[in-house]
Image (cartoon, rainbow, N blue to C red):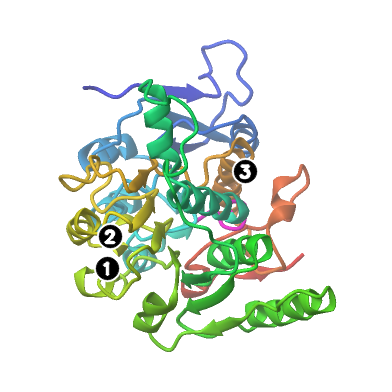
Amino acid sequence: MKKKWTTFPPKANQPLADNPSGSKRVVVTKELPGNAWKKILSQAACQVEVCTSLDALAANELRSAIGTHCDGVIGQLNEVWNNDLLSALNAAGGKVYCNYAVGFNNVDVAAATSLRIAIGNTPEVLTETTAEMGVALTFAAARRIAEADTFVRAGKFTGWQPSLFLGELLAGKTLGVVGAGRIGSAYAQMMVEGHKMNLIYFNTKPNVALEKYFVSYGKFLSSQGQTAVRCTMASTIEELLSAADVVALFPALNEKTHHLINRKRLSLMKENAILVNLSRGPVIDEAALVNHCTRHPNFRVGLDVYENEPAMEKGLRELPNIVLAPHLGSATLWTRENMAVLAARNLAAVLNGYPAWNGSGIMKFLGEHPPKAAPSIINARDLGMTFSHQ
């Protein structure tokens, strides 16, 4: 089916044009929430073409959209921006691509750098939102919310029963976090503070700030007559999987984390453990997960991402002990609108020749008077871009 596109500001022969000149051509591969991002690009002299179809664009459609002249693109995490596609963007005069996401495993950053294309992303604004979704999935799995909802809607609820949908109590249990970056740390804080869980985490390097935070929090609990929580870094992922009652996955997807959770590692987890994935689908071997959940009905899972998204492994949908969400990690209006703002700021800044930002935080880019810099360019240093912190 042919995809539908719209253009703004309207072209010169149309009424109400905010910027009829539109000297820079920008392609946005999905309609984004809010209007602030449109204003940013219009003020940067951009004529913007937006795909309004819900279906993902194939490589040939993206290449066609780029055409012979394209200064920049805002794309999606379910598009593969490889060397071929980035070369097409480069040939069309493109200087910048921004992923409408914090992750960028779908982008060949090395190829982009060799082509002198800046790669942007949208961090920080989705940290708490995604962490909250992790908490929601954790408790939906632990308390069997999806099963219970289906049960009630089917008219099967006839009254309170002592053994109806018994779940897991998480207070005081052990929380395992794989990938203690921004989102993983925020999730850990929500779970530990809210439910006095002990934390064990596995990361590429120690998260000293997180450990210090929980030392201080433990002292606070002790001062209130409560048991202090513990925070330890696991030396191996196997150590974490064996110890944790809840395992939440937040690692970046790369060659080392592909199928990080496989048949052997699933077998190390507790019989009634809870596994939650807010990272990327291929972090879990989905076929192994289906097999494990089939054989261990008290093992519960919350998934927001899938190995071959949107397709799912055969049998996954039918398992009652798996809660399924359609990739909603960052899906709050505030977050998605401000992801769009950051993406637009990245594009506008690069096209205007501004430096990359290396100041503290990027929330100031959400206001009306942001720094004259690109908020988040992944390969800025490799491109030799100058930096600004004010």
Viewer-proximal residue among 363 and 170: 170
Coordinates of residue 255 in the picture (x, y in percent): 27, 72
Viewer-proximal residue among 57 and 345: 57
Place residue 110 in its image quadrant.
bottom left
Q: Which residue is mark 3?
A: 338
All told, the count of numbered labels is: 3
Magenta stretch bounds = 121-126
Q: Name the residue furthest right.
A: 223
**Neighbour tally class for label 1: few under 14, some 14-19, many 20 plus, Cα within 10 Å:** some
The residue drawn where x is 40% and y is 60% is 274
- In the image: residue 276, left or right of residue 228: left
**Neighbour tally class for label 3: few under 14, some 14-19, many 20 plus, Cα within 10 Å:** many
> What number is the disc on residue 258?
1
Coordinates of residue 265 in the picture (x, y in percent): 27, 74
Coordinates of residue 139 in the picture (x, y in percent): 51, 50
Q: Is residue 382 above or below residue 141?
A: below
Q: Name the residue furthest bottom.
A: 235
Q: Which residue is mark 2?
A: 282
> What number is the disc on residue 246?
none
Q: Are marks 1 and 2 in contact (CB under 8 Å)?
A: yes
Q: What is the quadrant of the N terminus in the image? A: top left
Q: Tell me which label, 1 or 2, sits earlier in the chain.
A: 1
